[in-house]
Image (cartoon, rainbow, N blue to C red):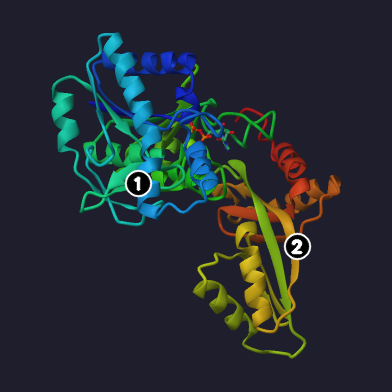
Amino acid sequence: MITVQKFGGTSLSDEVGRRHVLRHISREREAGRSVVAVVSAMGRRGEPYATDTLLEWIGSNGNSLPEREKDLLLSCGELISAATLCSMLNNEGIPSVVLTGGQAGIVTDGRFGFARILRVEPSRIEEYLAEERVVVVAGFQGRTEDGEITTLGRGGSDTSATALGAALGASAVEIYTDVDGILTADPRLVGDARPLPFVSYEEICNMAYNGAKVIHPRAVEIAMRAGVPVRVRSTFSDGEGTLVTNAEDVRGRIGWTDRTVTGLAHVRGVTQLAVETSAGPSDLQLRVFRAMAKSAISVDFINVTPAGVLYTVGDSDAPHAVRLLHEMGFSPRVQSGCAKVSVIGGGMNGEPGVMARIVEALTARNIPILQSADSNATIWVLVAENDMVPALQALHTAFGLHLAP
Ligand code: ADP
Ligand code: MG
């Protein structure tokens, strides 16, 4: 049996964390399982080998590095981390070997900076596992068919881990991080957020797509397709964390799946654009969205009315979007500094009154809702960024998420 363990940046940034990492690896080996350890770069922004630090370093040098070479540099953070762990394992008498993403068999397309995994060829890992070695794999990276080094974009190590888990037929993928699993909301913003012992792939995918960065949505999709259970847990404790599995499995364990609200997520840095016309029915909508699509600006919160359109874009795309609208002869109303708050739960479909409770909770705190939208498993509200944290807190309480299930 194989366990893939992924260790995030904060788990590896200091000696204390790295000792815990050793402990988790040893425990799996003592339980008779083979271990593949996928590592992120050590630490967060500001620390010497963190990915953000490498990016800032390039930026401070005029940012003239081509994309291919940028990926070469970015892939180093994980290699330093992997070599550090290998040396610690060897010190403990645990034989190990380090592989780059490419050497581990992760083959990607050639989109530097956000490459997609095409397939995984795990034979080299399997050979080392047969020799009873721990295989330490540099996360967040792969190689193209031609052997070029690529990186996978944000949350890439999560994706490396579940892709390897799927290819190896691992019995579990464990994502070790700095919180006790997947919580009902980001614990940095909502003090009484509570760990969820079990969630379905669909629930966590929805949370991740809407901004919960504890695990990357692409990583969840890969695990879901392969049916590999994922456990998100803390490096720094022995808590069981959160088991992510299919809905039937969750139902078997807790007796039900369709909780009305599972959790909350948020995205900052959103700009709302309103384009109006008094000219009556026209092709305005079509022209606006064609122009956005042509410039690869992703749009959200789309409301189309006879009088015009209302939608949002990321703050970083906003100047470009506004310029395009002006070029088309429109005078858009622009509201920057907004945030998207998402209320997520598979059981809200058909449950009356969820939106009413959201409105009630936010109105009681004098938080204006700038826009809203919904699907069968999520309700989104757009609020001013300053209102985001109070909105999360109000909704968390309103839906009783602070109470044990
Ligand atoms: P790592 O470096 O281990 O990959 P990340 O920073 O990517 O760690 O993810 C862990 C962080 O995700 C936590 O510190 C927490 O602030 C944040 N987070 C956001 N939403 C959630 C949530 N619903 N549950 C748990 N953590 C969350
Ligand atoms: Mg992460």
Residue 341 vertical placement versus 124 (above, below) = below
**Residue beneath label 1, please?**
222
Q: CA distance from mark 2 to mark 1?
A: 37 Å
Please tell me how many numbered marks the rendered image carries: 2
- Regarding residue 312, the answer to whether it shows in the image is no
At x 32%, y 24%, the residue is 83
The image's mark for residue 127 is none
* Left or right of 1, for residue 115: right
- Regarding residue 306, the answer to whether it shows in the image is yes
How many other residues sit within 10 Å of disc 1, few (<14), some (14-19) or many (≥20)?
A: some
Residue 201 in the image: x percent, y percent?
43, 43
At x 66%, y 52%, the residue is 269
* Left or right of 32, for residue 325: right
At x 16%, y 34%, the residue is 124
Residue 207 in the image: x percent, y percent?
54, 45
Disc 2 CB within 8 Å of nearest ligand 1 atom: no
Secondary structure at numbered mark 2? strand
**Residue beneath label 2, please?**
335
Q: Nearer the viewer, residue 365 or 143?
A: 143
